[in-house]
Image (cartoon, rainbow, N blue to C red):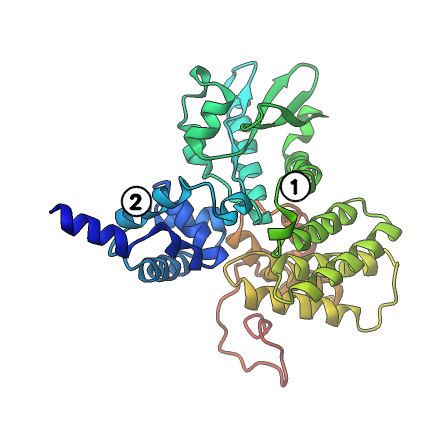
Amino acid sequence: MQETSTHAAQLHTPGSIEGLSRRQLDVLELLARGLTNEELAGVLKISPATVRTHVTAVLARLDVSNRTEATAMYIAWSADPTPASIELRRPAIAVLPFVAVDDDARGRAIARALGHDLSALFARGCWFPVIPHAEATRLPSADLSLSERGQRLGASFLVEGTLRKESSWRLSVRIDSATSCHCMWNDHHDFPDDQLFAVQDAVCEAIVTATYPMLIAHTRAGMRRASDPDDARTWELVHEGMRLHATREAAANAAARSLFRAALEREPEFTLAHFGLGLTLYDALQNHWSPREDASDRIRICAERCLILAPHAAEGHYLLGCYFELRGERSLAARAMAAAIRQNPCFPAIRALLTAAHEPGTDARPAVASNRTPRPGAPRGLDRYL
């Protein structure tokens, strides 16, 4: 028996993990934490079918027959501090349960919703793995230190918040490093009671927009620059573009478009860069910051790329809604926005545009396959709406 175990260990050396792709290593790391395929899909923002494909590829690459053996290999490998890829491994984010200070039923419900929405928005950014919110809510955090909570969840950054009701609502949010136990960022937002649901999405989006570039820059600063050939710089470009886009100013919009194009020159299949470019083009048209010629077609092209690269996500449907809305095709815009909501119910701003696009009698059901003949030359992605 001893000889068999020794022989197996020689066959399955930790160094074989070095041959995994970045995405496969992400899958293996989360798999080793005990996440199910459905939870992996939620964290990585991919479909369960794609997760199964990645898991099968990882097991084949490692020449193991099950998750338990793969986990054992990963633990042995990650215990060795020498591989540079350990240092380059992207740290995870966990959104801990938000606390309703006043402890009334409505406050608790709102606090739960805010925590869930923030977790979903952080996951949309995709650079940092996000611990499933359900897992974070099960952690008995009251009896654990900051570093212990981070270790239990496998997260480097912990997001916490409190919700207090006085004359108005006050949401206080902070992000701590579980490694250094330092506060990375904190802020608060005040809003009147009657505007709670109207501003909830905007507040969550503002928090993620403000913190995501800061967390990427902080993480990248700790990497070995000589061993950092991959995607950190591209992600910095994209999230700086998202930050500029959120200011809704003409000069910032033009600068953001330049950043998104620079990111696409580095990685032409970067879905979030296509999405950001489409958003800035839409805002430029809406605010008359740029000529209208061909701009709507460029938005349509960005939408198509998002649908092809991330068919399971909401971004492509959202941009198609913007495209149809600009063309005055309100029924098609409503259907595209409804499809986006179906893909991601936490997607900010969709509901507002859906409301604007929806007219009495308009069919705003999610898009389904149509028996109608597509228009001649209809681009891919649009035929489902035509």
Question: Disc 2 designates what residue?
Answer: 72
Total residue callouts: 2
Q: Disc 1 residue type?
A: Tyr
Q: Position of residue 378 (x, y in %)?
A: 62, 80
- Residue depicted at x 51% and y 28%: 96
Q: Residue 193: which quarter of the image?
A: top right
Q: Position of residue 300 (x, y in %)?
A: 69, 69
Question: Disc 1 designates what residue?
Answer: 212
Vertical placement of 355 versus 264: above or below? above
* Foreground pick, 372 / 284: 284
* Foreground pick, 189 / 2: 2
Q: Disc 2 residue type?
A: Ala
Q: Which dot, 1 or 2, sits closer to the camera?
A: 2
Category of crowding for the residue at label 1, using alpha-carbon neighbours closer than 10 angstroms: few (below 14), some (14–19), many (at least 20) = many
* Foreground pick, 220 / 162: 220
Element carrying mark 2: helix
Element carrying mark 1: helix
Q: Position of residue 208 (x, y in %)?
A: 65, 39
Vertical placement of 115 versus 217: above or below? above
User: Can residue 35 be seen?
Assistant: no
- Residue depicted at x 14% and y 50%: 3
Category of crowding for the residue at label 2, using alpha-carbon neighbours closer than 10 angstroms: few (below 14), some (14–19), many (at least 20) = few
Say whether disc 1 or disc 2 marks the residue closer to the N-terminus: 2
Q: Quadrant of the C terminus?
A: bottom right
Q: Position of residue 60 (x, y in %)?
A: 31, 62
Q: Residue furthest left?
A: 1
